[in-house]
Amino acid sequence: MENEKNHIIPYRTFLYILALLITLTLTSVAITQIYLGTLTVMLALLIAAIKSSFVLRIFMHLKFENKMFSIAVIAVVLILSVVIIITFLDYLYR
Amino acid sequence: MNTTPEIHRDDLASKTGMWFFLFTEMLLFGGLFIVYSVYRFRNAEAFHLAAKELNVTIGTINTIILLVSSTTIAMSITAIQKKDKRLALLLLCTTILLGLAFLVNKYFEWGEHLKEHIYPGSAVLALRGQGDVLFYGLYFFMTGLHALHIIIGLIFIGVITVRIYKDKIKYDNFVLLENSGLYWHLVDLIWIFLFPLFYLIT
């Protein structure tokens, strides 16, 4: 009896993702050296978010796993976002 | 296939448990990121100047080291699924070496700060003002907590490597390897946010 269906991810996929992640890292280093201001923060965080979605989906197998895991991760991210938004509403308008 | 009596095993439950633990880790670091962003908001100028003093080159090298080590541990799962024990061991040893390289870099990086008498509670740092005290306090605490996670991850992966070597973990029962991989990727994930927040955004 099989405990669960195991999805074998080819080695190639990981190497492609690695190349992509390193490219994104170098891009964010380059961007932050050029621009200044709020845009820099936004871009750097956007790139970090893109990178983490690849790590979560491919390296951490979320793409091939039971949907329950993805939903739970999204829930945690939402909880954090709500707390961040409420904290900043407080600091900006007190 | 089930002719021999086997011990009950539930890989899905095992992974679920690991994920729940990872959620507490995400919330722990998430809380620290909120503290960081509030202090940054209130001390924008000091954080801007202090962040410029961090070494972007070492930070970038460490980011790439962690990304490569995440790739090697992810590939070791493919290797063990394909019953290639030798390659799995090789990839795991590479992961451990890369993790150690990360710590060596951190040692030199922190050493530079300590030489300039910049550390939490230092009198030199106190003279530079509240903003710098907060920035370096968070810097040492968050990168230190992250480094502690690297050390724990290395021990975890080390134990798994020995178990694979002794054939206790094989192609049909590698959920522990998957869990150690998940932990290692989380450590990578946290660094993906620590790096731009401390080194890049000035």
Image (cartoon, coloured by chain):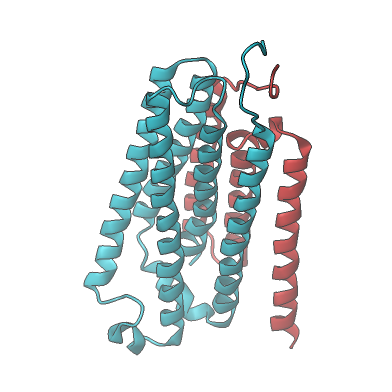
Chain colours: A red, B cyan
Give the left or right position of residue B165, taking residue B189 as reference. left
Q: Position of residue A83 (x, y in %)?
A: 72, 69
Give the left or right position of residue A90, taking residue A33 as reference. right
Residue at the location (42% across, 39% down)?
B157
Residue at the location (41% across, 80% down)?
B132
Q: Position of residue B15 (x, y in %)?
A: 64, 39
In this view, the residue in front, A17 or B101, is: B101
Q: Is residue A37 visible?
A: no
Q: Residue furthest left?
A: B115
Give the left or right position of residue B52, taking residue A83 as reference. left
For residue A87, above or below residue B81:
below
Quarter of the rendering containing residue A37: bottom right
Q: Quadrant of the N terminus of chain A?
A: top right
For residue B75, above or below residue B16:
above
For residue B189, above or below residue B200:
above
Residue at the location (40% across, 32% down)?
B161
Q: Position of residue B3 (x, y in %)?
A: 65, 11
In this view, the residue in front, A90 or B183, is: B183
In this view, the residue in front, A24 or A58, is: A58
Quarter of the rendering containing residue B113: bottom left
Give the left or right position of residue B28, taking residue A19 as reference. right
Q: Residue furthest front?
A: B5
Q: Position of residue B68 (x, y in %)?
A: 44, 36
Residue at the location (62% across, 39% down)?
A54
Q: Quadrant of the C terminus of chain A?
A: bottom right
In this view, the residue in front, A26 or B92, is: B92
Q: Is residue B6 visible?
A: yes
The count of marks equals 0
